[in-house]
Amino acid sequence: MHALITGVTGQDGAYLSALLLGEGYQVTGTSPRRSSDNSNLRRLMEVGALENHKFKYDTMDVTCASSVDAMITSQHFDVIYNLAAQSYVAESFVSPLATTQINYNGVLNLLESIKKFSRETRFYQASTSEMFGLVDCEAQNEDTKFHPRSPYGVAKCAAHYAVQNYREAYGMYACSGILFNHESPHRGIEFVTRKITDGVAKIVSKQRMDISLGTLDSQRDWGHARDYVRGMHMMMTQDRPEDFVIATGVTHSVRDVLEIAFSHVGLDYRDYVEQDARYMRPSDVPILCGDPSKARSKLGWEPTVDFEDMIKEMVDFDLFRHNVDPLKYFLTGGSADAAANR
Ligand code: GDP
């Protein structure tokens, strides 16, 4: 089996590559360009994908139809996972058109190319809980109406409907995974969980004194990315294409992330966090909580990582990245100097 993963250099691309390679797939992973120092391949290196002979890294720009057509006609893909996106909600307010270009037009380019050249190829679209936006029910499932609150959410809704339309109009195996927020040590630094865990590690290693954040009241259903890419793969190996919500069903606030991350290193977040209007959004999503019942019953999917363990894992990874050995740090009663991992 041969899989194409767009946006392969991101968090989910790395975990999905590792999963599929482990299942014996050949994986071609793409991003729009190769950075001169290969730093964008860091995650793929860390999960061991780069050294696997069945993994190939290539360039493709989903916003350019000829680039997409060239890739899809150059070899046969059994499945395409579209993870390419401008994935940062705050940035979408600054660049709504560029966000739409990637997050919606890019999806159309892929769907059109599959329709024209490779109708049997299965297509996965990375839909998102941000499509629900302003919610008026306790838990969101596949039937909950969308009320996006950002250009990011709007573009993702459009792409979601396009996938549904190609499935109905052309009988394509195309489906969307409506994934709630999913994190890990490989999460981008601009997302709030990783911003906090990286900030904690920088405070411990005395590189900074505090963290500036926006609202601490937002609540999200945060799961672990490794669990969530497993859900993607399960969706793509069903008899019939269907959309699924992937979530834990448990909600926490930004304040809860702070509480766990700081107390893990023996500190009180109230001494280190300041609020900064720069990180407030013109319209935000106050609360999300997913209902993964369908994924549970039809796919047999279950989350395996507890929220608190995930945040602690992220802090530990970030301590390592900032040259503090977490084990020595805890054994020496919280001395970053004694635990310096140099
Ligand atoms: P999102 O749900 O995809 O927008 O994921 P994020 O991790 O970017 O944001 C989750 C929530 O945390 C949002 O409601 C943000 O407004 C809130 N938040 C508060 N402070 C910050 C911050 O400094 N950075 C980010 N990214 N989010 C923040």
Image (tube, rainbow, N blue to C red):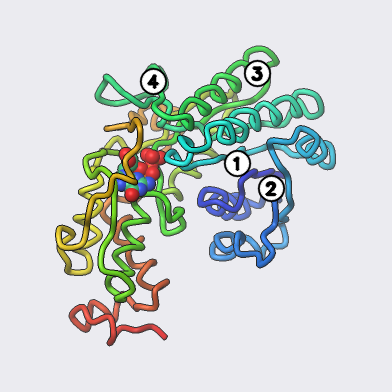
Mark 4 sits on what residue? 147
Of callouts 4 and 3, the N-terminal one: 4
Disc tally is 4
Of callouts 1 and 2, the N-terminal one: 2
Disc 1 to disc 2: CB gap under 8 Å: yes
Mark 3 sits on what residue? 166
Rendered location of residue 63, percent (x, y): 69, 35
Alpha carbon separation for disc pair 3 and 2 = 25 Å
Q: Residues within 10 Å of mark 2 (few under 14, many from 20)?
A: some
Residue at left 74%, top 36%?
A: 64
Of callouts 4 and 2, the N-terminal one: 2
Which quarter of the figure has residue 165? top right
- Locate ligand 1 by image quadrant: top left
Mark 1 sits on what residue? 84
Q: Nearer the viewer, mark 3 or mark 2?
A: 2
Mark 4: amino acid? His
The image shows residue 188, relative to residue 337, as above or below, that is above
The secondary element bearing badge 3 is classed as helix
Residues 279 and 197: in front is 279
Residue at left 78%, top 37%?
A: 72
Which quarter of the figure has residue 277? top left
Mark 3: amino acid? Tyr
Q: Nearer the viewer, mark 1 or mark 2?
A: 2
Of callouts 1 and 4, the N-terminal one: 1
Mark 2 sits on what residue? 32
Q: Residues within 10 Å of mark 1 (few under 14, many from 20)?
A: many
Residues 307 and 41: in front is 41
Mark 1: amino acid? Ala
Alpha carbon separation for disc pair 4 and 3 = 22 Å
